[in-house]
Amino acid sequence: MVKEMQSLREYVSKLIPAGKPQRVALALGLTALAFAALPAIASANISLREGSGTGTKIVVGKAVTIKSSNLVFSTTGPAVGNVECSNSTLSGHVSLNGAPQAKIQITSAAFKGAEEGALERCKTTIAGPIRPLTAEVSAVNLAWISAFEQNGTSTTEGLSRIVATTGSVGLRSKLFAEVSKGVVAQVSNCVYEKESVAGTFTIGNALGDLISAPEFALNAGASTGECPSGGTLSGTGTVEASGGVSVFTSTP
């Protein structure tokens, strides 16, 4: 730090005309203040930790899961209603930790419910011929990256968008209807995409990411059948390390 300050004094002395000592003193004083602030800025990192906010810092590459029991995709016309998945698991690993952002790379996802027995389809409130439709929901455009900030906000984007500025977070919803007594058939295959999904969480607590993502748009070219034109994704995802240990956030 001493060498850097000496170099700055020499540089500032060349820039400011001779005979202006007050200006030199002021400039050097401001420079010293800026350097003094650097350690505080550098320490403003966020960490993912096991078990508590003071637990072991999770190493990069360690497997984690994000689990949710309340994911809801609220659709807009022409088929208005909710797609509700009560047992969702996103799997991946920590890809950055102890930096201005902490990141989890999501490489697989399963969205399930309790409809139609072993098929575990998600229920919907979308009207069908005999009873409400059911949905088979899957992820599109994996891998995704969830980035957690020091201010308690998160952003989930497709890895392809981060690397090549193209791509999106995508969901595929295959809708099924009971077309006659005991006969269920697929009626549509709907793909929805959004550049990024925003969330919020509380620093120091177990990491529960509350998401509310409006304006998922229908990718008409990748869809078939009568599909809702768009929708909003909402719900909470809790992050766990191996053995079901809760993941907490801390700064630093």
Image (cartoon, rainbow, N blue to C red):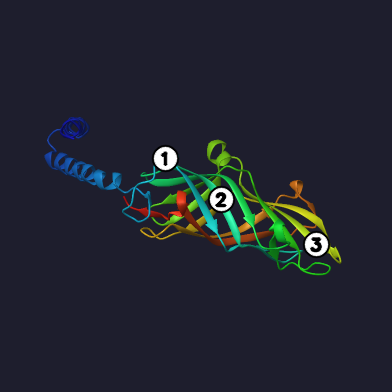
Query: Do the residues under discs 1 and 3 have CB atoms within 8 angstroms?
Result: no
Q: Which corner quadrant holds the N terminus? A: top left
Q: Give residue 177's mark.
A: 3
- CA–CA distance between discs 1 and 2? 17 Å
Name the amino acid type tagged 1. Answer: Val
Name the amino acid type tagged 3. Answer: Ala
Question: Which residue shows up at 79% across the image and 55% down it?
Answer: 188
In the picture of the structure, the residue carrying the numbered disc 1 is: 60
In the picture of the structure, the residue carrying the numbered disc 2 is: 90
N-terminal label among 1 and 3: 1
Judged left or right of residue 148, residue 138 is right
N-terminal label among 1 and 2: 1
Question: Is the residue marked by circle 2 packed among few (<14), some (14-19), or many (20+) residues within 10 Å?
Answer: many
Question: Which residue shows up at 55% across the image and 41% down it?
Answer: 159
In the image, residue 89 lies at what x, y percent?
57, 53
Judged left or right of residue 107, residue 178 is right
In the image, residue 219 lies at what x, y percent?
71, 49
